[in-house]
Image: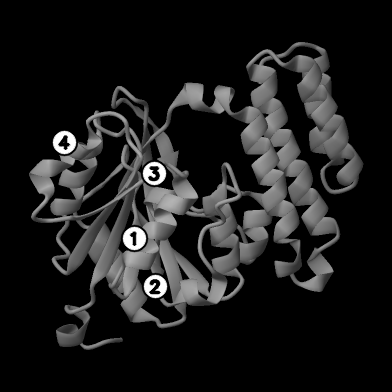
Amino acid sequence: MTPASEQEKRWVSIVIPAYNAADFIRRAMDSVLAQTWPYREIIVVNDGSTDDTLRELATYRDEIRIIDKPNSGLPAARNSGIRAATGEYIAFLDADDRWLPEKLTRQVETLEADPDIGFCSTVTLVEDPQGSPNGEWPCPRSKESLLKTLFLQNGAIPGSGSGVMVRRELFQQVGLFDPTLRSLEDIDMWMRLAAVSRYVCIDEALTIIVKHPDSMSRNLDTMRASALQVMKKNRELLPQADRGGLWRAGYANVMADYAKWEYRSGQRVKAIAHLVNALGHSPIRRGRMLAGLLLAMALGRTL
């Protein structure tokens, strides 16, 4: 472990992409400034906001760096922050989420304890836009490696784009966020990181994210297409023996997850078609689960 005198000098670069975030950026900023870890730089990437985001940030100008750029999407905004970062570690925070005060301290301690750990996150509390509790996002409990787990369960890393801290040097090895992805660019990145480094989840609720229920229904097609693109582009990261059955099982899981959301939003025919597609990919490993979902949808049951 790094001696305390050296550990205390580790700097964290905090990257906050912001697009039309005037209504909530102050809450995110205040949670960062309340962190017990003092060695930090705060980089806010204003991604072409057309509201009062910059005006809201003016209060913090002595404590943050602002990158003001034309709108080009979340992956590109995060990449601008990474390129500007100077800290040993990079922590990401979406502008509508926030952290509890010990979050950065606990993550730095985790990464400092073992140089083989390349990235980490924390248990995450989920809220609705009104601030009411909406469950907890726990640490992954799978017996598989994280890489395999991410293929079988895309959302395995709690907090995702607001919970993860990464060693900055790893981006030189795996590259930056993929700007061609319209969604799930964070899952794509975690897969690439998991292929080259270890991950640890801190079993403390230190991250808080806001879940917007209407966002899922509006973006189902985009999210499903991006999820399948991520599954296909990263298939070769898996060990050779897992690029067949395990990968097809993961593909079927993705199709089933989005089929359930489609069904709940009233798109019954589309949902059933996607379940049939999933069944064709993994009839043995996922056959029973998919058949059960097909029957439930055919009978109009609540899922």
Q: Earlier in the sequence, mark 1 or mark 3?
A: 3
Report x, y in % for residue 263: 70, 19
Q: Nearer the viewer, residue 70 or 198?
A: 70
Alpha carbon distance from label 3 to label 4: 17 Å
The answer to which image quadrant residue 255 occupies is top right
- Local crowd at mark 4 within 10 Å, few (<14), some, or many (≥20)? few
Dot 3 falls on a residue whose secondary structure is loop
Residue tagged by mark 4? 55
* Structural distance between the alpha carbons of marks 2 and 4: 30 Å
Residue for badge 1: 91
Q: Is the Cβ of the residue at disc 1 closer than 8 Å to that at disc 4?
A: no
Element at label 1:
strand
Q: Residue furthest front?
A: 70
In the rendered image, residue 132, in percent from the top left (x then y), is placed at: 31, 25
* Label 1 close to label 3 by CB (< 8 Å): no
- For image coordinates 41% across by 34% down, the residue present is 135
The residue pinned by badge 3 equals 70
Mark toward the start of the polypeptide (3 vs 4): 4
The amino acid pointed to by label 3 is Pro
C-alpha gap between disc 1 and disc 3: 23 Å
- SS for dot 2: loop
Q: Residue at x 68, y 23 (%)?
A: 262
**In-image side of 109 versus 252 (left or right):** left
Res. 138 in view: no
